[in-house]
Image (cartoon, rainbow, N blue to C red):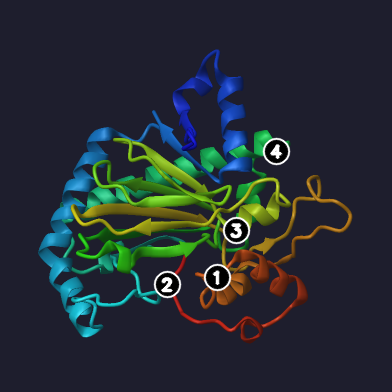
Amino acid sequence: MEKIIKFPVVDLSKLNGEERDQTMALIDDACQNWGFFELVNHGVPYDLMDNIERMTKEHYKKFMERKFKEMLRSKGLDTLKTEVEDVDWESTFYLHHLPQSNLYDIPNMSDEYRTAMKDFGKRIENLAEELLNLLCENLGLEKGYLKKVFQGTKGPTFGTKVSNYPPCPKPEMIKGLRAHTDAGGLILLFQDDKVSGLQLLKDGDWVDVPPLKHSIVINLGDQLEVITNGKYKSIMHRVMTQKEGNRMSIASFYNPASDAKISPAPSLAAKDSEYPSFVFDDYMKLYAGLKFQPKEPRFEAMKDGAGTTDLNPTVTVETY
């Protein structure tokens, strides 16, 4: 018998009414049992989201598609005769917002696109900080605790990965993005509402994250699992390729500063916590070579002070 799984969808507007307690409980349950939830009525203007989706897809067609096809040919992926496990079927570019922006260094972006992405980035940054305070409230932490931990001496790191997942003739042969947990703090995703592909691992099964128009998908990174002493979880997720349609993904990462000191919050930690204490940049150096491996050995390596060579890193990735 097929399982019926109801993906958690949070209506943020209900925080201001009689359903606040139920909404906070839904967020808490999602953070504990899913590591993901989907936000609606989040305050980011829908016309801004529509314009960004239009311009992102236009930008891909005009400037990125040819490079993607050249990459496929150069790596012998244009035929896909055998299963590929060390490359992702995606076209990406990265925007850095904090501590310093590279928005005006990205080639081939129109002024309209840059202006819209700057506006969107600031709104997503504000939403991330609002959500962190909601998590603090649910966890019994003082307001602003998580933001303060993320602050370090330089302020948080915040950036956006703009991706397109083009149609794939043999989706059974390659993933759009291989399974992983995210290294950082809070991830806010504006995804395509027509072309699906994002899945998360729930109780041993891969579950689709439903594409909802104008929603923002939230997921928790490894740092929040450590700070909450495992009460909240980062969850393995992946992107499946599709035969039809080009899937857009705009994922924004609100992460700690590179010198932020990460450890379980004292009020949530037992005397001997299973989770390590470390500087965020040290974790990122480890993660860069081990993104597509389980998180638990990374945590153990940080606890033991082990180097990346102990875990046989296999790939280097650009991360925030």
> Mark 4 highlights which residue?
139
Q: Marks 3 and 1: CB-CB under 8 Å? A: no
The residue at 29%/67% (across/down) is 89
Q: Earlier in the sequence, mark 1 or mark 4?
A: 4
- Label 4 to label 3: alpha-carbon separation: 17 Å
Mark 3 vs mark 1, foreground winner is 1
The reply to whether dot 2 and dot 4 touch (C-beta < 8 Å) is no
Above or below, 153 relative to 197: below
> Which residue corresponds to the image point at 89% horizontal and 54% vertical from the top-left?
271
Task: Write the residue at 74% across / 65% down.
Answer: 277
Near-viewer residue (133 or 167): 167
Looking at the image, is mark 2 or mark 1 nearer the viewer? 1
Where, by quadrant of the figure, is residue 217 drawn?
A: top left
Amino acid type, callout 2: Glu
Question: Residue 192's spot in the image, x, y percent?
Answer: 27, 46
The secondary element bearing badge 4 is classed as: helix
Residue underneath mark 1:
293
Q: Please tell me which of labels 2 and 3 falls first in the chain.
A: 3
Callout 4 touching callout 3 (CB < 8 Å): no
Which amino acid type is marked by label 4? Leu
Q: Which residue is mark 3?
A: 222
Type of amino acid at the residue the image marks with label 1: Gln
Q: Secondary structure at mark 1?
A: loop
